[in-house]
Image: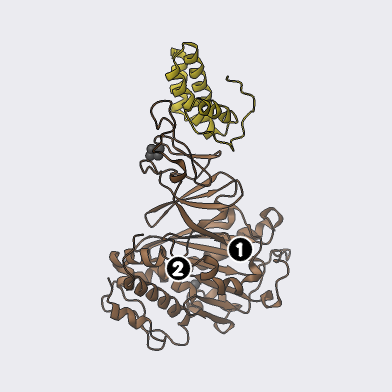
Chain colours: A yellow, B brown
Amino acid sequence: MNEVLHTKLLKAHECDDTATLALLYAQAADESQGTGDTQAMFFFLTQAYIFALDSGLPVAADYNRRLAKHGRDVLQKDLTGSQLDTHR
Amino acid sequence: MSDTHVLAKVLEPVSGARGLPNEHYTDPDVFDEERRHVLFANWSGIGFGKNIPDTGDTWPVDFLGMPLLMVRDEDGSINVFQNTCRHRGMILVEQPKKVRGTIRCPYHCWCYSLKGDLRATPHVGGPGHNTHEEIVHEDLGLFRIRSFVWQDVVFVNVDGNAPAFEEANAHLLKRWKEFERDLYHGGEKASFKLEVDTNWKLAVENYCESYHLPWVHPGLNSYSRLEDHYHIQEPGLYSGQGTMVYRQLSGEAGEVFPDFDGLSEHWNTGAEYIAVYPNVLLGVHRDHTFAIVLEPVTLNKTVEHIELYYAKPADKLPESLIEKNSEQWKEVFKEDIFVVEGMQKGRQGVMFDGGKFSPEMDGPTHCFHHWVASRLMQGRNSADKPV
Ligand code: FES
Ligand SMILES: [Fe+2]
């Protein structure tokens, strides 16, 4: 993970800003995807999912769907997502 | 433990009965016994619906050391759970807060729905793997505590073995059927609590009786004399007192609170005050109700949580009266503090034998003692079952 993102994450953790955490972890997942590190990608996506769920962000449904598609989680049918599978 | 023979004396008719012996107010072992057989085995009050008005509102309660969590779900229903994560037993919610859809454990972030279902178990199968065949979500929901909301009071039966709330309180529900209606909490000014150095039972006992009114509440004498009161005593069920001369509070311009619609004539000047055993005290009048949840903090510390309700939302009520009414009740409840604290102190006197009831005036108090003693006897007789 790049330094800037790392610092931002620590800061968001410090103030328990879960919506920002969801966003930043999603960025980290994208970054890992870019470098082909699948292991790290699913780790960060999980983090993003939990914080999105906690913040009541519709995007939680998308993360959940992505995780479930790869056998990393159970599909939560009653999560209403943004419908647009923006993050692949 | 108190002597079972002495307890049997409590079960005699009021004229020959003794009150509950000292140990029931001074002995930590008896407090534990009552916790189990009286407060956990019956329908006890732990809070109010008004504490969690909206979806996602959560309210942790430490009920005699048992961590509970009240939650308002998407359907508007109130759920009560054990406030303990199914993973490593972390406390889930420490402060009242609003959650957005899930209750997230602060330790490893297992997430539960507002209905207590386990929804997410991050990294449970290793980093980035959020499932594991041994982690069956369906089996790992939050432990649900039986609950029932009546008169905005959240009642729970912790051990799960009491008859249904409607069954246990059928007689009272019928008696007060007319007050089965929407109640509107009077807002910030209609809410207060009193911390009292007394055993929780003494607060119930004092509430049930009208005998003390002329001495402890002389202010009430002018319009509410002893002979205007009647006893309410339903053996094995509940007790309290009623008045026949309730007068509405009125403001400077003669304004009054709006009445509950369609009440029968009886309530024009009638009002009733009933102890819903074990620890909830309710009062009903033509234009307001109140509910008191007694929180038994320790053997000799009780917090009285008091809330007032009206027939219309607070913004449709005469504003100055809300405060005036609260102040008036607070005054009355405060007048009672020295007696409930004094009776607690008095029970340090080792020769006190539970006391002698006035067969004429102490029926409602005895009714409560009889109920408590019966529950304890029942508990002692029944085989040990885990709580
Ligand atoms: S103790 Fe709650 S998630 Fe581990
Ligand atoms: Fe009183």
Q: Which residue is mark 1?
A: B325
In which image quadrant can residue B327 be found?
bottom right
As measured in the structure, the alpha-carbon distance from the residue carrying label 2 to the one carrying label 1 is 26 Å
Point out the tag, 2 or 1, that comes first from the N-terminus: 2
Q: Chain of mark 2?
A: B
Q: In the depicted view, which residue is nearer to us: B160 or B329?
A: B160
* Mark 2 or 1: the one toward you: 2
Q: Is residue B62 visible?
A: yes
- Crowding near the residue tagged with mark 2, few <14, some 14–19, many ≥20 C-alpha atoms within 10 Å: many
**Is label 2 in a helix, a strand or a loop?**
loop
Quick one: which residue is furthest to the top in this view? A35
Q: In the depicted view, which residue is nearer to us: A85 or B64?
A: A85
* Position of the N terminus of chain B by quadrant: bottom left
Look at the numbered disc 2 and say if its residue's Cβ is closer than 8 Å to ligand 2.
no
Question: Which amino acid type corresponds to the residue marked 2 in the rendered image?
Answer: Pro
Q: Which residue is mark 2?
A: B278
Give the vertical position of B362 relative to B132 (above or below). below
Image point (60%, 31%), residue name: A58
**x and y percentages locating residue B309 in the rendered image:** 61, 60
**x and y percentages locating residue B155 in the rendered image:** 50, 61
Give the vertical position of B261 relative to B211 (above or below). above
